[in-house]
Amino acid sequence: MLDKTSLSVLFEALEKLDSGFQDLPEFSSATANVPGITEVLAKTAERLQDNYPYFHPLYAGQMLKPPHPVARLVYALAQWINPNNHAMDGGRATSRMEKEAVGEIAAMFGWHEHLGHLCGGGTMANLEALWVAGQSAPGKMILASEQAHYTHERISGVLKIPFEAVATDAKGRMDLSAVYERVKRGDVGTVVATMGATATGAVDPLAEILELSAAHGFRIHADAAYGGYFTLAGNLGNQARKAFDQLQRVDSIVIDPHKHGLQPYGCGCVLFRDPSVGKFYKHDSPYTYFSSKELHLGEISLECSRPGAAAAGLWATQKLLPLVNDGEFARGLESCCEAARELYRRIEASPEFIAALEPELDIVIFAPRAESLSAASELSRRIFEAAARNHLHLAMAEIPARFFEGKLKGVKQDRTSLTCLRSVLMKFEHREWVGRIWELLEQATKESKGN
């Protein structure tokens, strides 16, 4: 199941890397031949078997996918150097690779002038974006939808910035009337537009939020940690396409290469449209940057030590799979959308299930039919467990019942939310596996009902 053939390519690349240091005096590493490495590796491999098969298409639960082989190999290759991209001195080659790779991501959004860098993940990237937002509009509130990632509220608390969540509409998107009622008070500094909600994949109406921004003067931060790469997809629905086409007008963007960007964890990215926000990062550390006159990444980042290997893996992946429309990478994203729509169509046609929210990206939310919301929630849990026993791994999510608009007639509304099954079809192979996923889902449903 696991790719092993690519290891020979790694050995070849390692020989190439080693040849660049042949003029150094020979020495023996103190750790290269530690007794017991073989035994420890075997024990580690055994422990790692206690995982769900995140790499397999039958894992369609949480937002987990394997990195591309080139990212995995280059990351490993860089570990023989172990560069630190906090400063040019610690990661000379990989710092340049990071700037190039981040520039390509910015260009994907239409930004040719920007400030940005890689982060440990989406949480740290969003922290930096909201920190700059707070510095730009001191004392003013951060506004996000109730379906935005929970870290925005948590980050705002850490930064001591007022935060408020506003309602979503029946499609799971930020409710524009609720935003208007809140921003007209004049104390909102930044609105967070979620470009692919974690639970549902819903895309906030960015074009309309931008119109409100023009009238009321607040910043816009686009949390595109999950959905950002879908700007390259040519098969988005009209509403999602309209929103993604406006990304170049926002003030800041967060995207996670370790999700759809095919990178190992952790690899997030924060971008700012106005490079002058770099003034908020300014410091004069006397001990870290002594050999480079270039602007180094440590001057535009809240994080200090960061793996240069992450930058190398991203750079190599984007060289192999450029971030362009109609390219191989874009077609992979399109196949994820097609997989979600195919699964949604099967659910809609089935007497066993009801689906919430026609998928805008590659996330499908659905629940079994039952006499009440409580009964449907309990049946969801049983199906989840039965599916896992048959090697189909889904996720569960608590979703407002109003997201099933018009589909709950005759169902007893004994609670306001519904425990649903959630499928994230983010692997490029998922389009070919929808049929098998559906077979296993039907089998799990029969088992759960005792049929």
Image (tube, grey):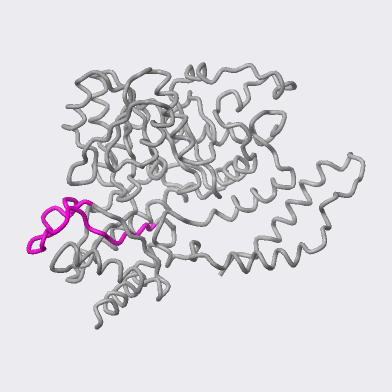
Q: Is residue 298 above or below residue 35?
A: above
Indicate the position of residue 448 as horizontal and vertical percent values: 28, 76
Q: Is residue 39 magenta?
A: no
In the rendered view, does 212 fall on the left or right side of 229? left
Q: Is residue 189 above or below residue 194?
A: above
Residue at the location (62% across, 21% down)? Answer: 295
Indicate the position of residue 111 as horizontal and vertical percent values: 44, 28
> The C terminus appears in which quarter of the rendering?
bottom left
Indicate the position of residue 312 as horizontal and vertical percent values: 63, 42
In the rendered view, does 330 fall on the left or right side of 118? left
Q: Is residue 424 magenta?
A: yes
- State the extent of the magenta-drawn residues as a range: 400-425
In the rendered view, does 334 fall on the left or right side of 101? left
Indicate the position of residue 136 as horizontal and vertical percent values: 40, 18
In the rendered view, does 50 fall on the left or right side of 187? right
The residue furthest bottom is: 451
Residue at the location (46% across, 47% down)? Answer: 327
Q: Quadrant of residue 185?
A: top left
Residue at the location (43% across, 19% down)? Answer: 135
